[in-house]
Amino acid sequence: MTLAVGLLAYLLGLCVGSFINVVVYRLPRGLSISQPTWSFCPHCRTTLRWQDNLPLIGWVALGGRCRYCRAAISVQYPLIEALTGLAFVLVWYLLAVCHCRVLGASDQTITPLVPSWPADLPLLAAWLILTAALMACSAMDLLFYVVDTRVTDLAMFAGIVLAALWPRPEFYGPAASSPLAAATLAAFVASGLWLWLWSRRHRATQEEAVETPDADATGGEPSRLGRLACLAALVVITLCTLALLIVHSAHLPGAPGRWLVPAAFVILFAAMVLAGGLPREIDDHLHATIEAEAPQARRQVLGEAAWLLPIVLAGAAAFALVALVPGAAHAWQKLTAWSPVGGLAPVGGAAYAVCGAVVAAAAGWIIRIVFTLSFGREAFGVGDIYILAAAGAAAGLDIALLGFLLAIPIALAGWAICLLLKRTGMIPFGPPLAVGFLLALWLNVPAAEIGHAYWRDIQRAWQQQPHLILLGVGVVLVAFPISVLLARLLRSLLEADQEPPASPPADEQAPGD
């Protein structure tokens, strides 16, 4: 049964990857996903045959060119299909074979989740939907520096619904019955109502479509070397994907899997770096836009903080109600534990997913507000906050926060490599987040063990020597403003070295000039 699910995940990943190509092409340009129904050539606008749309096979059979006008078909299409298939199989392998997801924890042991089909299909489905959304957002972020919130909203709401249908109350029950879950649910409902009222008042329109020439969509005229490199990449990705399936089905020893999973992450990282390192005209335009908007960055983020204030107050009121009123706490625990069918607690599962989405988004908003106020420039994109919310709902709060922490060194490593490939340092953060969330799933068990060990040490230290904890907190609070001041000083020195010398005023010019 497990192998059948893995094969289904691979085939589904190829098909979803083909649809992601449609999403990536149409949404940033303001085109409809459903109209026209069938795919078309961006050059001659001819509707493609069904066999031309077969994932991987269609591009290889056509030799990377349109059947009708012989224009080049971008290597983006088969690569996204192959990478999505690899990501789907990787998620299946980590969940079903490696048992990487933590089910529960006690004071001494961490219990991994051993899936039972079909009971745990909602967990796998939530992860696959999240993976598809991450692939789409990463591709749009790499190409246009745009994250379409409709994609992240779909993953977030799918994660909430699937969590409600997942019969694992022992996993989400304790967190769902807490005052924090009640607070985040109130904040989630308040944010929806506030968005609805704000949109009605301001008649907000969608973001303008990114204007890109057709050459960017089709990849230009491919060289023979470029086509051979793409074929080689497809072979490597496909072999790694199939190896993840074969190792499990052949019941081989665990040694091959030790290099297969790292190899899959190396492939995903390499694809992110190579795609992010391609120079584009939009890089300079976006850099100039950020520099032009820098003087208003603090004012804008303060307006965002004021907009979030009613949502924070709603969550704080719900937290105080459940934490301080015994009757409210009992009613909330009874509601989250309600089970209409054996093993299913829909309110508790949905509350857990909402808690993950809201807390992950809150972490993103805090980082955006604090660092924008500190540096006077936009520090964290709003689209990345939506990605965090989707990950928190579909994968869990622990995966979302750990994935965000892992995405920072991944982004720094990718940025350092991309500087060798293009002039500007404009690197989107969406792809590192996608790789970070998948990496967090792989490291979920050891990260939980380390986290619980540190938490026990902190509790012991607080009981025996609380002044050490207070001293550590004080050092962090003092070190943060000092590091911000040093960073701003270094940036001002670098910018001063790059500025050309100013010409003297007219009244100070030498006689005879």
Image (cartoon, grey):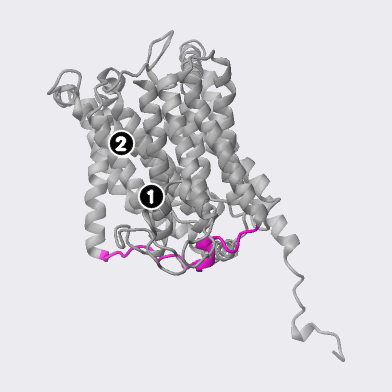
Q: Is residue 84 magenta?
A: no
Residue name at image x 34 percent, y 20 percent? 1
Task: Label 1: state its secondary structure.
Answer: helix
Name, please, the residue furthest toward the top.
Answer: 108
Residue name at image x 46 percent, y 50 percent? 58
Q: Nearer the viewer, residue 106 or 300?
A: 106
Report x, y in % for residue 19: 38, 49
First in residue order: circle 1 vs circle 2: 1
* Quadrant of res 325: top left
Q: Nearer the viewer, residue 54 or 434?
A: 54
| Region of the chain picked out in magenta, as a range | 202-223
Q: Which residue is mark 1?
A: 19
Q: Are marks 1 and 2 in contact (CB under 8 Å)?
A: no
Report x, y in % for residue 406: 53, 34
Above or below residue 131? Residue 42 is: below
Direction from residue 256 to residue 82 in the image, left or right: left
Helix, strand or loop for the magenta stretch, by majority? loop
